[in-house]
Image (cartoon, rainbow, N blue to C red):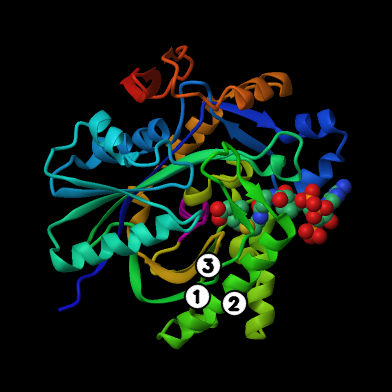
Amino acid sequence: MSVTVGIHDLAVATAGHTLALDALAAYNGTDPGKYRVGLGQDQMSVPGPDEDIVTMGAAAARAVLDRHGADGIRTLLLATESGVDQSKAAGVPVHALLGLPSTCRVVEFKQACYSATAALQAAAGLIARDRSERVLVIAADVARYELDSAAEATQGAGAVAMLVTADPAIAVLEHATGIHTADVDDFWRPNDSPTAVVDGKLSVEAYLDGIVRAWDDYRAHGGSPIDQIDRFCHHQPFTRMAVKAHRRLAEHVGVALDEGLIDVTTGYNRRIGNSYTASLYLALAALLDGADDLDGARVGMFSYGSGAVSEFFSLVVQPGYRSALRGAETEALLAARTPVDVARYRELHAGAALDSRFDVDTPVDSRGPFRFAGIRGRARRYAAN
Ligand code: HMG
């Protein structure tokens, strides 16, 4: 008997500071319209010295556990491309901060922005084997490019935690899925670099190639025809990219697609910036929180991770889903961020790369539930606030 699996709860976290892109535009002499309209971005979240993927991921997961408890959670999958260690999974300190039972496997998933989708599919597989299991999937990233680069305006930081269960309250994951992998050097981060290396134009083309190829594979594997998909969430490295993706898909399929079907999905990413693995799920959160009535709606999801892996899959929103949402909490988090000017943002950017050979105590700065306390004996230390 096939088990109905999907997203039972979804909570968001982001970094504690925010930079207005108008201020960045004024600083570097760019027309603000390029960022607001050309990229579709208004702000970016900026991590403080005591914030990283562990603190943001744990904060998002704390909200999920406060509502649902930890019973039945035997797996924590943390997806990130801004990992804080080459060996130890970032989910292990998250597991400790959350006080999860030791009878829980913890693994990190990596493939650029795509890996949260791989984690979601793996979670569905585990639950199909034992429907009493609940899997905590966390997507957390800090998007950091070089200062004064073309990509600088597309930075950001955020996390999404999802509780994946049988008979979910929010959305059921459909079986059909379309995949495409190609070895492309469009974006990557060498082991010795704190910032990503990117060929911006190539990355846009590789993304657009990924959507049509993943779509074709989705259809070849029994995915719904385009006219049976009610809404679309596309990965949003900057929100204008979702419009480009939507147009490319429409052109490929040969239909006129209504861009209104993606509008509401950009609400959080416009203010958070690129959060890599979390970005697609922030688009989903914005859709669920912002659209009127999605009971029974099928949502097409396009996940892209440079390098490059693409997946197109679909979700069906469950009747009564609104009672499981957290739109007011997410708005409060965004509003609580401290605005910084360009000088402070540049200081935070420059201070982010720490040399693990030196012990350091990180200044208390964030107001989230958890903080990165510093480095001792080359290991990162975390604490509750
Ligand atoms: P750029 O070269 O500075 O920008 O870099 P541009 O000149 O291409 O301009 C951008 C848009 O603004 C253009 O519109 C301009 O016309 C418009 P488009 O032609 O694209 O429709 N524009 C204006 N609009 C209104 N008023 C104005 C104005 N001036 C110009 N005054 C680029 C842009 C995205 C390449 C750069 O920001 C970058 O390299 N970003 C990082 C890479 C990236 O985000 N790639 C996206 C696809 S890859 C991906 O999604 C994966 C990723 O998330 C990571 C992962 O998977 O690991 C990045």
Residue drawn at x 34%, y 57% is: 119
**Location of residue 249 with respect to 349 vertically, above or below:** below
Residue drawn at x 65%, y 69% is: 208
Crowd tier of the residue under label 2, counting other residues whose Cα lies within 10 Å: few below 14, some 14–19, many 20 or above: many
**Most common SS among magenta residues:** helix
The image quarter containing residue 35 is top right
Circle 1/circle 3 CB separation < 8 Å: yes
Crowd tier of the residue under label 3, counting other residues whose Cα lies within 10 Å: few below 14, some 14–19, many 20 or above: many
**Is residue 104 magenta-colored?**
no
What is the C-alpha distance between the residues marked 1 and 3? Answer: 6 Å
Q: Which residues are magenta?
A: 279-293
**Location of residue 20 with respect to 11 vertically, above or below:** above
Q: Quadrant of the N terminus?
A: bottom left
Return the disc, 1 or 2, that comes first in the chain's sequence.
2
- The residue wearing badge 2 is 212
Q: Relative to residue 177, is residue 144 drawn left or right?
A: right
What is the C-alpha distance between the residues marked 1 and 2? Answer: 16 Å
Residue drawn at x 51%, y 21% is: 49
Rendered location of residue 161, percent (x, y): 36, 45
